[in-house]
Every structure is written in structure tokens, then in C-alpha cells.
Amino acid sequence: MQLLRDRTAIVGIGHTEYSRDSGRSELSLACEAIRAAVEDAGLRLADIDGFTKYTMDNNDPIDLARNLGIPRLRYFAEVNYGGAGGPVGSILLAAIAVATGQADAVVAFRAMNEHSGRGTPRLGQALVGAVATGTASYLAPYGLFSPAQMVALAARRHMHLYGTRSEDFAEIALTCRHHANFNPQALMYGRPLTLADHQASRMIASPLRLCDCCLETDGGAAVVVTRADRARDLRHPPVYISAAGLGGGAWNHRFMVKDCEARETESTVIARQLFRDAGITHADIDVLFIYDHFTPLVLMALEDFGFCARGEAKDFIQGGRLRWPDGELPMNTSGGNLSEGYIHGMQNNIEAVRQLRGTARCQVKDARHAFVSAGNAVPTSAMILRNDR
């Protein structure tokens, strides 16, 4: 969508505490994150006239507006597929609304009580009804209830095809934990992780161990999107949305098992579009945010988004390549879904903005372009952000 290049910008970011049990409603979490993002932008709540969200978010835009004292909404929209469509797709919807004049300032948000279960439908639970419908009717009879079980099949196939090992998956977990230990707001702050710790963690769905799986977290996160010309007069240097996109393959349906051998996936299609629309190459990316719901899918995402060839991710990540401060392509520098907190990927967007503002704790020197992806192995979304430096 080249018409969107640099016409809109992220101008505000905000989030709540990330916890195991918020003790609060998801509405309260959303309101806190949104207030923080609007304040960060230097705007008033009355300036907000649009909301975009994940379809599975339980908060209603009109209820949010009423509770926040927003006098009117000109726009609201939502995007499917949870952590695949939502983290970037909600920002893309906001950018489209702003660029086309449907709204002036739009908040993309996610608020969830994923761990405590206060108001959040849980994934991975065995069905209690008499029948399974839709895709579940093909999966549930064989015991495939959770994303971890499905991803395990794809991970095992990747190991068979390319010689990938559990130790390679561990490098992703260790990288995210390394960054989280610089971030006092991360759930895993002060809890270092070693390879031995990873290998000793209990098996969830072979070959996935506990440390290969993202956290379950309560919390909220939000960003504010407005026009680029308006953004230049606000509190922080604007972070421009250079390119963003959504995509799905013929085999995609929510948490289906990823095809490790497909020549073209949802991610390869989006990658071509994004780099073309942004007018840059992979070599121009300074900092990377890959949706780390499960460590094997990070390796597959690196391959599918074109940062390395199919089957080469296990070698690409070696030598601390993804670790700040010495790695050449630092990834998920606040800890990611694996070690900071799991707000369905929205927290990675916030860290990407910090990096391009120059205010991150694990700050990448002279960072100008950030690549941000949502969940891989399902219909996905991704974007390229840049600053004016």
C-alpha cells in the first residue's frame, strides 16, 4: 500500500503494568493504557476520534469513549486473527482511517486478562460441548486443542527438514530473556535464563519446552496514530509508518500447522510488498521485532520474511546476532512475548517506537528503520517504521 508511505505516524505510546493477576477489569486496563498513550502524544482525550482493535478484544469502542470522556467517535474498526492480524493490522486500519480523512487521531489498543482469565476467553482448553464445529472438528478429535500442540508439529517438521535443534529454539528464548533483564517493567526482569535452564524446562508439546512458549499476562497497551504533518508539531519526534500489510495463504485458518516447505507463505507475500512500498531493503533494517509466541516460529518468520533463506535461520541467529548491544540485528529489545509480557504483540509495537525515538533501554545506536511482524503460521501482518534521523 505505497499510497500510505510516511503519510501517518505513531505519536503516542502507553501501557499498564504487566502482571499475572491485574485484579481489574479489561475495560480499566484499556482506559489506563489509552490515557497514557494520549498523554504521551501531548494530545487531549477529546482529540481522539477513532479506535481500532483486535476482534477478540472484549472492550467496546463506545464504552471506551464513554468511560474516557471522548465526546464523539468518527471511526472504529477491528481486525481478525488475534496476534496475527491484530498487532500490526490494528495500526494499519488506524493509518488508513487517518490518511483518508475518516478520523484525525486514532488509538489502536489491546487489553487482556490473559493469565487471570478475568473476562478473557481462553485458548487451548478442551471442548466441553457435545460437538466441535468448524476447523475444530478436524483438530479436536485428535487432541489438538492448543496453539502449542499445533506449532509443535511444524517445529518437528522444520527439525526434520533442516537439522534445526532444540538448542536453536533456545537461542530465541535466551535473546528475549537477555533483553528483559535490562527492563524493570518486564515480567522476567531479574530472572536470567541459561541454555541449561531452557533444556531443563518441562516439556509442553514435544519439541516445545516451557521456555519456548510465550508468557500469559494481564495488561493493556495502546498507540496513537495521526497525520504526518500534524505529528511534527506534537511532543515527540514522529515515527512514520512507511509500509504495512496483511496477508493469508490458502492453507491458513487461525492456528493451522505451518507448512515449512511452502515456496510462498503469507509472510513472503507481505515482505515483498513492504520493502517495495517502503523503498528500502532488508539491509536497511536496524532493529527487529518478530512476534515470539513460540520460539520455532521466530526462526520460520526470519526465513519467510526474507532475512535469511529457508532452513538457514538456525545459522543466521548464531553468535548473538539478535542480541543487544553487540549483535548486528537486535530483536525484541524489551523482552518480547517470551519475557516482557504477552499483550498479544502490542507491546512490541511500543518498544519499536521507543527504539526509533532513541529512548529504549537496550537502545540500538542510530536506529532509523524497524521491522515489526505479527504472528507467523496464521494470517499475518507486518510493518516498517522509520524516523527522520
Image: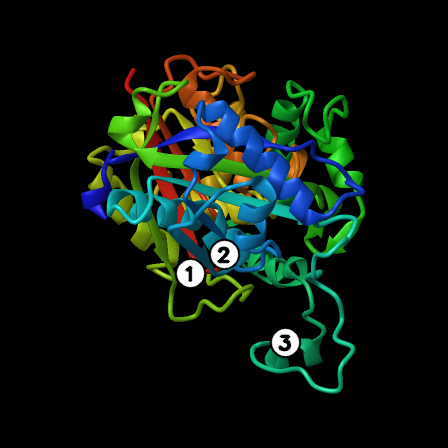
Separation (CA) of disc 1 from disc 2: 8 Å
The residue carrying pointer 1 sits among few (fewer than 14), some (14 to 19) or many (20 or more) residues within 10 Å by Cα, namely: few
Quickly name the residue at label 1: 261
C-beta proximity under 8 Å, tags 3 and 2: no
Sooner in the amino-acid sequence: mark 1 or mark 3:
3
Q: How far apart are marks 1 and 3 (CA)?
A: 21 Å
Distance from the alpha carbon under mark 3 to that under mark 2: 24 Å
Is residue 374 shown left or right of residue 5? right
**Please, what secondary structure does the residue beneath circle 3 have?**
helix
Looking at the rendered structure, the secondary structure element under dot 1 is: loop
Residue 322 shows up from this direction: no
Q: Position of residue 215 (x, y in %)?
A: 70, 43
Q: Mark 3 points at which residue?
A: 139
**Which quarter of the picture shows residue 148?**
bottom right
Residue closest to the eye, 275 or 83 = 83
- Residue neighbourhood size for the residue with mark 2, other residues' Cα within 10 Å, grouped as few (<14), some (14–19), many (≥20): few
Find residue 185 and report its horizontal and vertical position in percent.
Answer: 68, 25
